[in-house]
Amino acid sequence: MDPAAFEWNAMHGWAIATAAMVSAGCAVVGTLLVVRRMSLLGDAISHAVLPGIAVAVLAGGRPGGPLVLLGAVAAALVTVGLTQVLRSEGGLAEDSSAGVVFTTLFAAGVVLITAAASRIDLDPSCVLYGILELVPFDTIRIAGLEMPRAFVTAGLVFATILLGCVLTWKEQLFAAFDPDAARAAGMPVTATTIGLLAAAALATVASFEAVGAILVVAMLVVPAATAELLSRRLHRMMLLAVVIAVVSAAIGYLAAWHWNTSAAGMIAVVLGAAYVLAAVAAPQDGLVARLAAQAALNWRVTAEDCLAFLWREEESARRGPESRDRGGWTLRQRVALAWMSWAGGVLWTADGWRLTDSGRTRAETVVRSHRLWEAWLGHHVKLPLDHLHPPAEWIEHHLGADVRARIEAEVGGRDTDPHGRAIPPEQTS
Amino acid sequence: MAGEDRHQGPHTIEFHDVTVAYGRRPVLWNIDLAIDAPGLFAIIGPNGAGKSTLLKAALGLVPLAGGTVTFFGKPFADVRRRIGYVPQRETVDWDFPVSVMDVVLMGTYPRLGWFRRPGPAERDCARACLGRVGLADVADRQIGRLSGGQQQRVFLARALAQQADVYFLDEPLAGVDARSQDQIFRVLSELRGEGRLVVVVHHDLRTAAEWFDGVALVDMRLVASGPTASVLTSDNLRRTYAGPLDVLDEIGLAVEQARRTR
């Protein structure tokens, strides 16, 4: 960004602060919606509050005022109620009934606002897309400080949501994880659910001016979904969702200013990018981590197969002059052997690859696992001889010492596999 | 048990003429059943017989179409603190971001009331319950990283943390390894030894005969109930597992259809 082009002033600061505040509120509510697998309902509510807002404005409320907040919450609860009624009485599936209810209510809101456009101070396109850039110009004076009205609303809503969340944390947690047990234990499951839905409505309506009805869905769902990839505890997930939401709001706003495009749109794009980044790079379940673990396993299997092969070669050399025909090593095996020679498991000699002592120990463990498993299968499952090798070839890389000991006990301490070959003893290094 | 009323005072649990319907369709018909503490009591029957529904009806999780259920002679709502419930393991999302400790602590929530958080006393209680089911060393693990049997024991520990007098367990031994099964049975026997009543929805007749004091055979209606040895007779079992009770099923369907077409 060209520093000269970005004239920092308080307007930008207030716009970013407002965006951050509404995102934070959405992230807290969104976390609970996502872990309850209710994000679709968040989507529905964010749209269905529109007629509530329209009616409240027609009745004399002003955008961001208490009457409008109340109208939005009422509309949200009507949406959820109607969804339940359609499901129980109309026999519709939950997603279909939510789809019918919220699109109809949203459309009714659009019709109302457009019809009354001359009489009320509510711009349909503003409701759909929000105008974050204009937020700083509608201000209110509080304690001698000129502040954007939208920021004040968002701040109050965020404080309310946060307070409610902290005070009812254990109720929310129990109801979200195991509603049946919570209800049986006398926890107020229905009340906490209604509270959560009302909070979703509040967070949504507070976000309308800044980001609009369509993109607020991204704010509800995406930071929480991203945080879920990165955290294993609910409170950490919520904290992380708030951080992601706030940082994305700031980055999105600045990027939009730089490229001269919609701030709300850019914030949602940044949130999406953050999700992709987390999905790829999450330390435990990320794509990279999973691929790396898979590759490491595959290489270990190749390396152990090479070691076991060399060990069997030594074994047959001990038994007699007839030599095993091995053909050549594949490229993958050569790479694995080269790597093991660096790690000290094998040596390159004039006669080809040979095991070192440590390589021999490891090879014996693999062969032991293999033959023990063949013995177990032959003994307990009574498989024919030609069925024994493939499963053992696969399982030999995955048995720990304790499992081997158990298998040994269960095959009755025999020391040969069903093919008559000796089972090497357990290595004690 | 049911039938002979030598019992003093109210039964620990009493189902009186309980009928349960899903929508309009009855799935359990006119159940009369009394169970008394202490004891290990199994509810047994084929798939779809309404065993879980019977538990849920007692706990107010599904509405009764008729009849009453009382605990210690009182309605459930008056004594719910004294009753612990372990739902089927598959009913919750085990990827939920909570630790083992978090889940067991939930058992202490009901006695805390609004706005109070679990403190050191609750944590000690939860830790002791985890120790009792042999899971003290995985307290900080995320629940999704446990085996099925361990998950079931976490659920049991949560119920123990509730310090109830009556325990309802829905299929606690389904898909559970041998070690977990032994551990669970040992804890359940301890509960009986402490004078409590444990009611288990169960599917395995062999272990039922071995472990439980009393049994109810259920297949949409109560086939038989009482001491295990007298109930698990080949005649009773044939009546329970004879296949779906076509008449009850068809009547249920007919009731549903009549409401629909009206």
Image: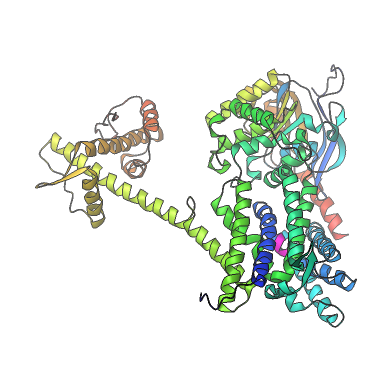
Residue at the limit of the structure toward the bottom, as seen here: A118
Quadrant in the picture for residue B35: top right
Q: Which residue is at 88% across, 73% downward?
A: A58
The answer to whether residue B202 is seen in the rendering is: no
- In the figure, A285 relative to A129: above or below? above
- In the figure, B132 relative to B89: above or below? above
Q: Which is the main secondary structure of the residues drawn in magenta?
A: helix
Residue B100 locus on image (x, y percent): 60, 37
Quadrant in the picture for residue A61: bottom right
B262 or B14: nearer the viewer: B14
How many numbered marks are there?
0
For the magenta stretch, what is the residue range?
A41-45
The answer to whether residue A259 is seen in the rendering is: yes
Q: Which residue is at 69% across, 18% downward?
A: B193
Residue A302 locus on image (x, y percent): 29, 49
- In the figure, B68 relative to A41: above or below? above
Q: Which residue is at 72% across, 72% downward?
A: A135
